Amino acid sequence: MKLFVTGICGFVGSSLATWFRERRPSFKINGIDNFVRPGSETNRSILRSRGITVQHGDVRNASDFENLPAVDWVIDAAANPSVLAGVDNRSSSRQVIEHNLYGTANVLEYCKRVKAGLVLLSTSRVYSIPALAGLPLIKGNHAFEWDKAAAPVQGASANGLTTQFSTSPPVSLYGSTKLASEYLALEYQYSFSFPLWINRCGVIAGAGQFGTAEQGIFSYWIHAYSQKGPLKYIGFDGSGRQVRDGLHPNDLAELVAQQIEYSQKPEAMTFNVGGGAANAMSLAQLTSWCAERFGKHSLESDLTPRSFDVPWLVMDNRQIAAQFNWRPKRDLPSILDEIANHAQCNPHWLDLSSAP
């Protein structure tokens, strides 16, 4: 089996490549990365030492795919993954579209040319921000909680969001480019008949994750807290009640392995993939966890809301569990422990991996 990974030196790409090297040693694994993400260069030598071929390449450039060899499967892990991308003055709106949509078109053309299957890693941020803001939630002591007495909501419950939840705009430039990529991939699959899986991933978290608050909140929060760096609850009454779920990349890798080895006709190609309600936590709860691990640290509160923030975003895994009998093996406390151990051994990690 020949496996090709875009964005192979990012956290998710490198984690998946490493998992397949260790658990599928007969696979030939190669990939490209443009190394624009701070910290990504550190993974190049690590991956190469494991027998994984890494070369410079940018998914935005069609010419970078021209001389690539044929493979059996492509895992598309290349993206500008921040919900603030294009509006945060660190990247332009055009760059977001080029990375996340035009890049997908080049990947799809490559899959068509070499007749490779595609695993497209999408995001939970394809879901409608107004619809998420309107979920029936109540203020618990330390977290927003599902109001079980409320009327049913299409595509959402205490178990999390399903793929039937609204994707109506606004969803952010990031979310809209990933949603457009999904539609484009489905059209290519229909027209050119190569295998396709689309995984809408929640927050993926683990040791070695590069850190900004918009991309890896669990990792960022723990690293910043361990160094007693500035942290702030933004919006939602400055209470830190906003909730996300966490998924370890090894659990994602196990699912991807099942998908590329799946031999039956799929009932669906698009799935929500995350830690689920059992592995969800609010910022306030995460802060309490950090306080027990690292001692007390003062945080600030900013009541000013931000356009792209949502109070509760948890992924319902029941559809994919039914299709693949897959569930996350790593619980959130063990993931947080892994990140905390990495933070203690790498006190300057955020300096290395955060954008200037």
Image: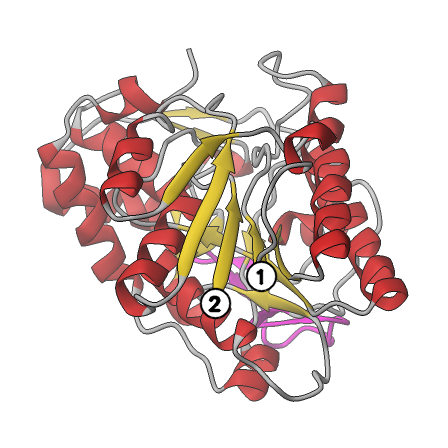
Q: Residue at x 11, y 45 (%)?
A: 293
Q: Residue at x 55, y 74 (%)?
A: 259
| Residue 152 on the magenta segment | yes
| Residue 253 on the magenta segment | no
Magenta region, residue range: 138-161
Q: Position of residue 79 (x, y in %)?
A: 59, 37
Report whether 235 appears left or right of 44. Answer: right
Asked if 45 appears above or below 283 in the picture, the reply is above
User: Residue tagged by mark 1?
Assistant: 73
C-alpha distance separating marks 2 and 1: 8 Å
Quarter of the figure with residue 11? top left
Q: Amino acid at mark 1?
A: Trp
Other-residue count near label 1 (Cα within 10 Å), few / some / many at <14 / 14–19 / ≥20:
many
Lower sequence index among marks 2 and 1: 2
User: Residue tagged by mark 2?
Assistant: 1
Q: Nearer the viewer, mark 2 or mark 1?
A: 2
Asked if 33 appears above or below 285 in the picture, the reply is above
